[in-house]
């Protein structure tokens, strides 16, 4: 089970890093870019779980949104640390 949750965290970590890179191209404000990136990652996580609730063989879990959001927040924290 732990490996499955690491999949959520790592996938959304990568999504956050790539989203941040794109958003940083169009915005010089670090805080605004991080907030927008995190909001996008959470929106995608919620949308994905909603989609899973509509499929027959998958189930939605608010806990998975938490793991996804943690992966995104970890990426944003690392981004800030590397910019120092």
Image (spheres, rainbow, N blue to C red):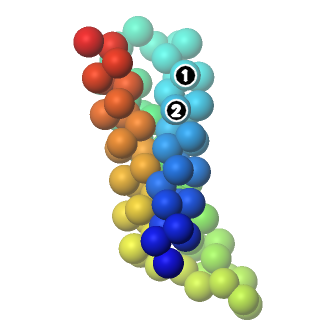
Q: Position of residue 79 (x, y in %)?
A: 38, 25
Q: Quadrant of residue 49?
A: bottom right
Q: Residue furthest right?
A: 56
Up/down of 9 relative to 23, above or below: below
Position of 78 relative to 62 (above/below): above
Q: Residue reaching furthest bottom? A: 56
Where, by quadrant of the figure, is residue 31 drawn?
top left
Label 2's element? helix
x then y, percent, for residue 78: 35, 30
**Residue in the image at 41% along x and 75% along y:** 62
Secondary structure under badge 1?
Answer: helix
Asked whether, in this view, residue 72 is left or right of residue 58, the answer is left
Q: Which residue is mark 1?
A: 21
Q: Is residue 46 visible?
A: no
**Mark 2, residue position:** 17
Residue furthest top as drawn:
28
Name the residue rendered at 34%, 18% in the picture: 82
């Amino acid at each position: 089970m732990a490996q499955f949750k690491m999949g959520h965290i790592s996938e959304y970590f990568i999504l956050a890093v790539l989203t941040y890179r794109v958003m940083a191209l169009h915005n010089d404000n670090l805080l605004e870019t991080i907030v927008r990136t995190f909001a996008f990652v959470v929106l995608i996580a919620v949308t994905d779980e909603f989609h899973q609730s509509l499929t027959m063989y998958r189930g939605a879990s608010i806990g998975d949104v938490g793991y996804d959001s943690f992966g995104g927040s970890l990426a944003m924290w690392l981004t800030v640390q590397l910019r120092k």
